[in-house]
Image (spheres, rainbow, N blue to C red):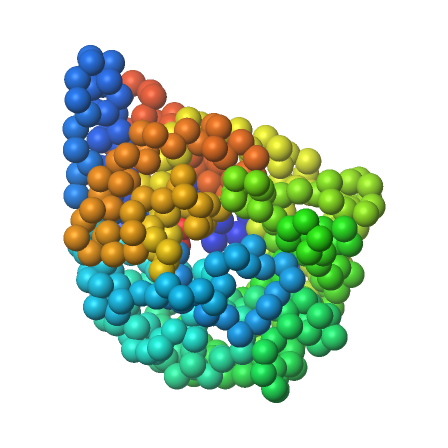
Amino acid sequence: MVKNELSSMHDFTGKLLQPSTRPVVLEYLTWRRAVRAAAAAGEAPPALPEIGPISINLDLTTACNYACDHCIDWEALNISVKHEEEELRASIVELKRRGLQSVILLGGGEPTLYPGFGDFVRFLKGLDLQVAVVTNGSRNEAITEVADCFTKGDWVRLSLDSAEDETFQAMHHPKGRGIHLDEICERAGEIKKKNAEVSLGYSFVITWNGSEREAGASVVENLGEMAAAAKRAKDAGFDYISFKPFLTRAEDGAEVMNPSQAQREHEQLVADIRAGVDAAMQWNDDNFRVVESINLRVFLDGSWENYRRQPGVCHMQALRQVLSPLGVYNCPAHRGVHKARIGDKGSWANAEAMSGTADILNQFDASVECAEVTCLYHSVNHFLEGIVSAEGSLDVLLPEANQELDTFL
């Protein structure tokens, strides 16, 4: 059995040290030091240089044909706000000019429902961007149609969260006929047949009895199906299955982990999930991976509350952002939250988001605003904070990694 080490998809520090990404990070850190020096001298801060995020989450639409009981973006689904196609494309072109390297298509809605989804994917690939798609699997044919344009490092991940169709139906409530787990997995295989370079993932959000999306909105337990889901994924030709814990929203809108909702004792919940991961690992080998998210790993090893201790400045706000029909936001964990809003949906098209980024970096105290968030970017944020605070040359403090990872953040 292959040991399930931290997946490269979660090595955010390593991704920032690559030759392709390091120049943007270096320019950001140089500016961040200058801001602190100006503050110490009682001077006005320098303007943010002409950089933008390296990676974005792009919510193409709020439309969704599912009604998942565990959906974290429930309140933002199927509302009237939409992107303007010309404005959206102008935003991406400007972001590319500023250093954008990857786009993850996902968000409050189902991306394949966006009118012209295929054309937009080809537009992104025409800009030489890495592209990933998170989909509910109901329209895999739309992804198969553009699979030919994907390149090495691009990926597609299906949010399936189950091993049996009965559980799938109870959790996702798909709207329309013929949306069943067997058919979804079969059609997913067509994506790989069209282009073997696409990495195909099976996403499994672990839920447990007692957990709620919001008060009174309980979710279906699925943790007993983890091993069977891994086998299904492997048999269907997926490259990996990714396990992550259920998250809910705090009163301030942040995505948080709340295991206290469980109807079993915390120690028993951890033991049950650990057993599920261990059972799934029997299918892990050189051709199929069982992946634990950072949130799940720290939940199981008991360090998850330590990941709530953030530095005052979340540096990742400058390097990874969310662009949705609702606006531009500083983090996936604060999608749609007013205090995390950088600008309106078209603000990158005319560079207004640059001033919004500078403002939020100086005003958003992550040690307070993210105090309940078990942050995926905890380690990389503390790494960057250490470099900003240290004395010495940034060229020395920020080593260039001799490795080839994707640029998705």
In the displayed structure, would residue 43 be above or below residue 262? Answer: above
Q: Position of residue 199 (x, y in %)?
A: 47, 68
Q: Nearer the viewer, residue 393 or 334?
A: 334
The residue positioned 41% from the left and 43% from the top of the image is 338
Q: How many marks?
A: 0
Q: Position of residue 57 (x, y in %)?
A: 39, 56
Q: In the rendered view, does 145 fall on the left or right side of 157?
A: left
Q: Nearer the viewer, residue 103 or 46?
A: 46
Q: Position of residue 213 (x, y in %)?
A: 64, 53
In the displayed structure, would residue 186 be above or below residue 83? Answer: below
Q: Nearer the viewer, residue 63 or 94?
A: 63
Q: In the rendered view, does 135 fall on the left or right side of 205?
A: left
Q: Quick check: can you spot residue 133? A: no
In the displayed structure, would residue 241 be above or below residue 14? Answer: below
Q: Dividing the image into 4 quarters, which one contains the N terminus?
A: bottom right
In the displayed structure, would residue 223 be above or below residue 183? Answer: above
The residue positioned 16% from the left and 28% from the top of the image is 46
Q: Position of residue 93 (x, y in %)?
A: 20, 60
The residue positioned 68% from the left and 74% from the top of the image is 169
